[in-house]
Image: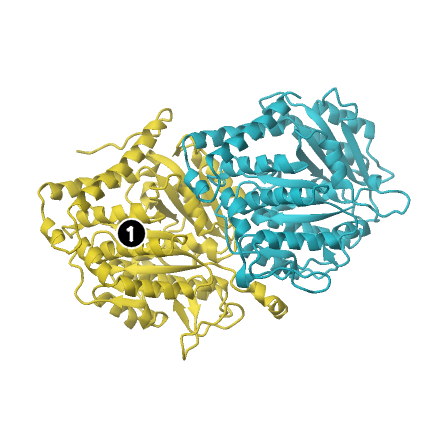
Amino acid sequence: MNDVNSESMNNSLQMLHAMTQSIVIQVGQCGNQIGCRFWDLCLHEHAFYNEKGIYDDAVSSFFRNTDHACDIPTKIGTNQIKNLKARAILVDMEEGVINELLDGDLGEIFDNKQLITDVSGSGNNWATGNKEYGTRYKEKILDQVRKAAELCDCLQCFFVLHSMGGGTGSGLGTAILSLLADEFPYVYRFVIPVYPSGDDDVITSPYNSVLATNELTEHADCVLPINNQSLINMCAKIQQALPQKKFSKSAGGSVSSGSKRIGSDKPFDQMNNIVANVMLNMTSSARFEGSLNVDLNEIAMNLVPYPKLHYLVSSISPLYVSKDVGLYARRLDQAFNDLFSKDHQLMVSDPQRSLYLACALMVRGKNVQVSDVRHNISRLSSNLCFVNWNHEGWKTGLCNIPPVGQQYSLLALANNTCIRHAFTDLRTRFSKLYSRKAHLHHYEKVDGFDRNLFSESLSSLDNIVAQYEELEHKSGSGTPQCLPRIKVL
Amino acid sequence: MSAVYLHVGQCGIQIGQELWTKAILRAQEDVDLKQVLWSGESPRCLFIDGERKVIQKFSHEMKKIKHKPSVDVLSNSIRCRKGCGANWSVGYHGLAQHTFGKDLPKIKAGYGQYLVDFDSSMLDVCMEAIRVKIESCDSFSGFIGFHGLGGGTGSGWGSRLCSELCDLYPTAYRLWNVINPHSTGESPTQHYNQILSLSKLQENADGIVLFENDHILDTLAKHCTTVSLKDMNNLIADTILSIYSPVSSLTPKVGGLSIGIEPWELIRSVAPLPARKLIQPRYVDDAQFSKTPAPLIWNKLLKTLTGRLRTEIHASASKSSCVSAVCVCRGVEKEFSPNLHHLATQLKQTYSCVDWNPYPLDVWIDEAKKIPAKGKRRSKSLTVCANVTASADYCQRVLEKSKLMFNNKAYLHWYNRHGTEENDFIAAFTTIETIIKEYKET
């Protein structure tokens, strides 16, 4: 990989600090569990590709290298990796999840100063998370973020991971997001929220989700919403397709720390792995070399034609959770087809039946060439409905390094109007509760929470749905594929 | 008559990689090429990018080549870390003010001093580096730029450099080679970037050589099933070297050393009118014709080239006509030289040249110098650079798409944020419309 020989030490000043860095902020139980899988797979990937253990630019995008005794970071270049620390901030208002993380194998890459915890939790209440804890921990969080940012040479973006249904994730997560928007206006904010499925067991999840979505619309640069139900479906699909013998074989790149059998993984691990893989693939072009680089700022700029419509539906093909656990597509063309089918989307949606505003296609693999990509794009364009002013709304990226254990991997990030169906469902569930004024008192008794926030958030959600609908209607005429989704009553 | 080569952005630098690799190999035997492209041991080129990965990879590859003269990529490159995100506006306006601080690249003058300090902006640093390069040239006459049109750094910063150099060195030629993205879409903002970039280049460059990704991919796809980006860049590099390398018909007989006027002669011949400066290059070599016997090779090359051109012209909507063209034949041997009269008639017919130009076709011949190894043949190539109305068709397509997006106000907030207002867009549309009108009146 980035093999630096001794001659170039003379030009070491120019060789240093070639990559941009990203900071991951994981909030709440869901956010921390996804984050845990992300760091595990990230370390695994870098360990696989960095044979000499040199702290080079690719590793520096998510990790810093420190001296054991003190936390002084060492410079990027030709040094051996001594002690990697993740560029992460872990926030949770209950101690259980983070403690478990620190006790596991990954504990060493986090240091105590990067953690912000409390004891009592948020009680699945957005207002508690956002208003109460948001104000209480504001200074501490900002302090940590500033320190982490100073340790970066060139900070390019923040990744914020949290769930939308709970209290800490949705509340405190969005409070942190607005802090970042104020403090670091020029650093891109990518949010990966997990929306609750229809049969979620948290009763107040619609309230939390709508209130949090309002914040995301205002302060995030790019949102990649994810739905638990689609992740469950994808894992089921993988399990079905696996040959039986895989179950007893000890997977070298095993999914969770230490366990040998797939069956004995912690419950959400496989699902969280899929999300972690999306993050890895998205940043692969920024970390590794390739013939067509797509940086994270390009994703934001190219896929967001209107400032508020920044919700990107992600899909991945072939499906895999770890090195030995995955579906192997027989042909590359088939993988491209799968990428746009509804089974491979991380949010329950059918983008093929809706309008595409723009789509990013990030390809990782040694043998995938530009002609394959162009051929597939022209083939697929005829089945997909693009908005009339953006028929060629593709952003392509090619990275030479495939993920560990796979020959190639495709990631699509689509700005598609199908997201409005998910929002409409959310709104229906919200209205059911709100019309009865159920559970509202929990929110109102929190200091700083105003009842108007509910109606504001609702109107902001309606606004986005209306904008998406308008785009669909404006370019709806003509192609037969753009059918409205059939509602099963 | 030396030129300074400027490679901007990922596309420009990747092409530069192939170009300079080939140039090093050819310069082993070709003394003329060596003294045109190098001043002593230092190549007359600069690599400029908004991120560091591409140049780093290039440098790594270049170090593996052990021939002299070599290209030391890192000391001829300017890299910052402000990526442009496929936004022309960031490339044109934002990058100029970017200051380096600690990351300052080392620009050495002949006496080994740094000429820029920590507060210098990207623009200052680039201008200083260019000045140093010019001073190292003997009889400097112009710039040759390379960048892509679809992205941010190449199209934005490349066109900004053209504007600045037009002001700073008004008597120098500016021959810009640009690469168009695939029409099926490489980036949603590519239409805006192409229009904005082309409008600036139309004002400031003397000649614009247009390479099209679609055309290159189609040409290569005829022989191979999969085409990699490296193959495409190789074809572009071959085309460029075949036009800009010294040709014996333009080398003065007295003295014998090439004066390197090929690029400027190209501008003079093919872009005679200031309103029409888009040049379309087409290249064919004998790599896949190894079975054709030597006497027939030139006819074969000509037939292949005219065949492809005719297909293109038939496929295009409007009537094609050509203002002027240059044809370069390389590898001509005394025994089997091409029939120039036949060549000229065929090309004039294919291109339907305008009647007001008495000398629409200029033919340059380069005689093969070295005797090839036993059993091998001297490689031959035929390149044609023509100023045709098909270039205006391309402008028309991109203009329509940009206007459609502009009317729907898509992506405008990203451009406004970095300094490009609606008026700039409208001005750019007007410039491109003027180009199209001029070409239609030919």
Residue furthest to the right: B254
Q: What is the display colour for chain B?
A: cyan
Query: Relative to residue A391, is residue B20 depicted above or below?
Result: below
Quarter where residue A42 is shown: bottom left
Quadrant location of the C terminus of chain A in the rendered image? top left
Using the image, determine if residue A182 lies above or below residue B252.
below
Residue closer to the observer: A311 or A118: A118
Tell me the residue at 44%/63% (across/down): A152
Q: Helix, strand or loop at disc 1?
A: strand
Observer-nearest of A8 and B226:
A8
Residue A267: which quarter of the image? bottom left
Q: Where is residue B121 in the image (x, y as percent from the top left)?
A: 56, 54
- Is residue A310 among the parts visible in the rendering? yes
The chain letter corresponding to yellow is: A
- Comparing B260 with A179, the one in front is A179
Which of the 4 image quarters holds residue A388? top left
Which residue is label 1 attached to? Answer: A193
User: Which chain letter matches label 1?
Assistant: A
**Amino acid found under the numbered disc labelled 1:** Pro
